[in-house]
Image: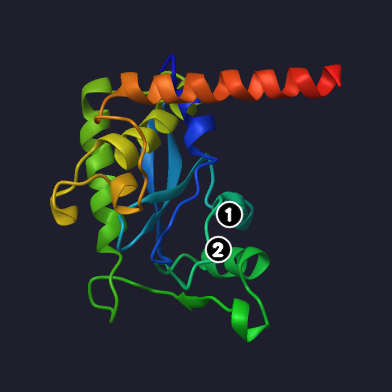
């Protein structure tokens, strides 16, 4: 909780090499006695968690926020986006990711499910892993606490948790990251602190100049 913000700001600027096959879904989590929606976008081949978003509603506006977060990351434009039947996904997709130019066009696949030609199992398994982590906590105490904890979840899943399907690698390692870490928070905190110190010095020098 203490270092999630510091490390999240650092990892969010790292360039990611992804397959471009994005799977999107939302799940319910309990926060301060109320149910909230937690949205996630995951890259199918690398299992890298691209974007997350916590909201109280499932509206077009919330989908737009999620897709904008993914678009603002230093990643290439996705090749395809796979979603379930929630109507807000299509409208949010058109607002943020649709392009009439062929070279920028993103394939939109809707109504993925158990009986569909293409499933959303990759992101549904991700939700299952998240729920397992949340069980011992019983309830996140506030929305602010929840957002910090979920930032920590983003970091843990991408940079610290090895995957069997990735032959024991983390999603970050599969994306080609060569950070000086050995699957520990301590190493990530060190790298993030070093980056923040360099950035602070750079800003100070610019101001003095």
Number of numbered tags placed on the structure image: 2
Is residue 139 visible in the rendered structure shown here? no
Q: Residue reaching furthest right?
A: 209
Asked if residue 125 lies left or right of residue 72, the reply is: left
Asked if residue 125 lies left or right of residue 204, the reply is: left
| Label 1: which secondary element | loop
Mark 1 residue crowding within 10 angstroms, few (<14) / some (14–19) / many (20+)? some
Q: Position of residue 81 (x, y in %)?
A: 46, 69
Identify the residue under disc 1: 59
Mark 2 residue crowding within 10 angstroms, few (<14) / some (14–19) / many (20+)? some
Is residue 92 visible in the rendered structure shown here? yes
- Residues tagged 1 and 2 counted as in contact (Cβ below 8 A): yes
Asked whether 20 or 116 is in front, the reply is 20
Marks 1/2: CA–CA distance:
6 Å
Q: Residue reaching furthest bottom?
A: 102
| Label 2: which secondary element | helix
Please report the residue visible at 23 percent of the width from the left and 42 percent of the height from the top: 129
Q: Quadrant of the C terminus?
A: top right
Asked if residue 126 lies left or right of residue 65, the reply is: left
Please report the residue visible at 14 percent of the width from the left and 53 percent of the height from the top: 167
* Residue 19: mark: none
Find residue 198 and report its image quarter: top right
Identify the residue under disc 2: 88
Find residue 121 and report its image quarter: bottom left
Q: Position of residue 6 (x, y in %)?
A: 50, 22
Q: Quadrant of the N terminus?
A: top left
Please report the residue visible at 68 percent of the width from the left and 82 percent of the height from the top: 100
Asked whether 101 or 177 is in front, the reply is 177
Please report the residue visible at 55 percent of the width from the left and 70 percent of the height from the top: 90
N-term mark: 1 or 2: 1
């Amino acid at each position: 909780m203490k270092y999630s913000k510091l490390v999240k700001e650092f990892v969010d600027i790292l360039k990611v090499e992804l397959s471009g096959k994005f799977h999107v879904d939302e799940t319910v989590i309990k926060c301060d006695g109320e149910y909230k929606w937690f949205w996630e976008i995951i890259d199918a081949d690398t299992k890298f968690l691209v974007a997350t978003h916590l909201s109280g509603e499932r509206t077009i506006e919330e989908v737009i926020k999620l897709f904008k977060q993914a678009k603002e990351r230093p990643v290439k434009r996705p090749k395809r986006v796979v979603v379930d039947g929630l109507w807000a996904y299509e409208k949010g997709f058109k607002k943020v990711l649709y392009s009439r130019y062929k070279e920028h066009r993103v394939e939109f696949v809707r109504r993925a499910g158990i009986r569909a030609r293409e499933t959303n199992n990759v992101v549904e398994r991700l939700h299952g892993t998240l729920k397992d982590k949340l069980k011992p906590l019983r309830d996140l105490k506030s929305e602010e606490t929840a957002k910090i904890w979920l930032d920590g979840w983003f970091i843990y899943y991408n940079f610290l948790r090895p995957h069997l399907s990735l032959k024991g690698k983390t999603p970050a390692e599969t994306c080609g990251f060569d950070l000086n870490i050995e699957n520990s928070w301590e190493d990530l905190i060190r790298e993030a602190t070093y980056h923040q110190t360099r950035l602070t010095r750079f800003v100070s020098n610019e101001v003095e100049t």
